[in-house]
Image (spheres, grey):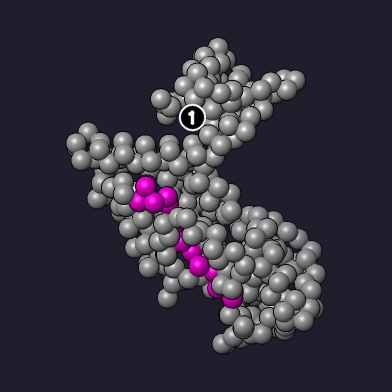
Amino acid sequence: MIEARHLRVLRAVASTGSFSAAGRELGCTQPAVSQQMKALESSVGTPLLVRTGREMRLTQAGEALVRHAAGIIAGLTAAEEEVAAIAGLRAGRVRLVSFPSGSSTLVPTALAALRAAHPGTRVFLEEAEPPKSVELLREGDCDVALAFRYEGAAGAEEWDDLVVRPLLTDRLVALVPEGHRLARTEGSVAIGELARESWIAGCPRCRGQLVEVCEEAGFLPRIDFATDDYPAVVGLVGAGLGVAVLPQLAVESVRPRGVRTVALEPAVRREIVALTLPDLAQVPAVTATLDELARAGAQQPAAR
């Protein structure tokens, strides 16, 4: 019989490459990891790991078991949480992963409402951009992941195996210095009007989207600065060092000083969603978190 604790140890060994590193990650000793792996191999009746130098490598059977482990552990976690909630033992625990602009806008509003309605629910927050956040969800390392994808982008089927809760549609806007020739423009501006400008690019996924949109408009942006930090993007624009394109939600997450936002044509939008696994969607604490995130999304200026 396969035990969940053994699967968790196997996943740790597979991800770290050694018994000692897995022990450090799990908070136990190297001999304890070795014993649990021996017990698991005895249960399944075949070797799961082979030693190659100082590292451990999965056998074909080990790879198959690791592949199924995330779903098995997620299902067990969902069952434990749901039974605990029904029994009144505790309100639940939610591990939430969000991208930075979501963490500073959607998440605080949602978690404040969640705490008021369910004070016993504990939420653990970690930051990661998609697709990393989605990988963490599929691997069983979180319960809810905030993610986004741009309209018309390839890979629309990448979330087919997940429960998708739409939160809002976020439009990209241009940021220009206050003294820029387009700073007082009313209405929308064609992105081609910024073709000769110096550009400040944001996160890698947003950066890729910027280049794609500019190429469709017939030019390649001259990117002088690139940073994952949205306040830094705003600061560089405010200092007159270039222009930028950011999602409206990212602009809402900082205090834009010395800059103006300008609507762009053609409109470029991204869909912001909360994702979870089908089994976890049945857990009361996860359902409550999804509900509050959806309410927070509806309240955002970017959604109007």
Which residue is at the front of the view, 185 or 290? 290
Check the image and name the residue furthest to the bottom.
186
Instruction: Name, please, the residue furthest toward the front.
Output: 45
Instruction: Where is residue 125? Give x, y as percent.
Output: 46, 44
Does the magenta segment cover residue 275? Answer: yes
Q: For this view, does 160 lie left or right of residue 56?
A: left
Residue 138's spot in the image, x, y percent? 50, 46
Q: Which residue does the numbered mark 1 point to in the structure image?
A: 8
x and y, in percent, of residue 286 in the image: 34, 48
Q: Residues within 10 Å of mark 1 (few under 14, many from 20)?
A: some
Q: Closest to the observer: 138 or 251?
A: 138
Q: Quadrant of residue 83?
A: top left
Q: Compared to 93, does 154 lie above or below? A: below
Type of amino acid at the residue the image marks with label 1 = Arg
Q: Image point 58% across, 80% down: which residue?
A: 267
Q: What percent of the width, then of the height, locates residue 202?
A: 66, 61
Residue at 62% over, 67% down = 154
Quarter of the rendering occupied by the N terminus: top left
Quarter assignment of residue 49: top right
From this view, report whether residue 45 is shown above or below residue 187: above
Query: Outermost residue, top direction?
Result: 31
Residue depicted at 79% across the width and 74% down the height: 220
- Res. 296 in view: no
Residue 39 appears anywhere in the view: yes
| Residue 131 falls inside the magenta stretch | no
Q: Which sits in the foreground, 9 or 179?
A: 9
Q: Is residue 197 above or below residue 143?
A: below
Q: Using residue 37 as the reference point, say whether residue 115 is left or right of it.
A: left
Which range of residues does the magenta coloring cover?
Answer: 268-281
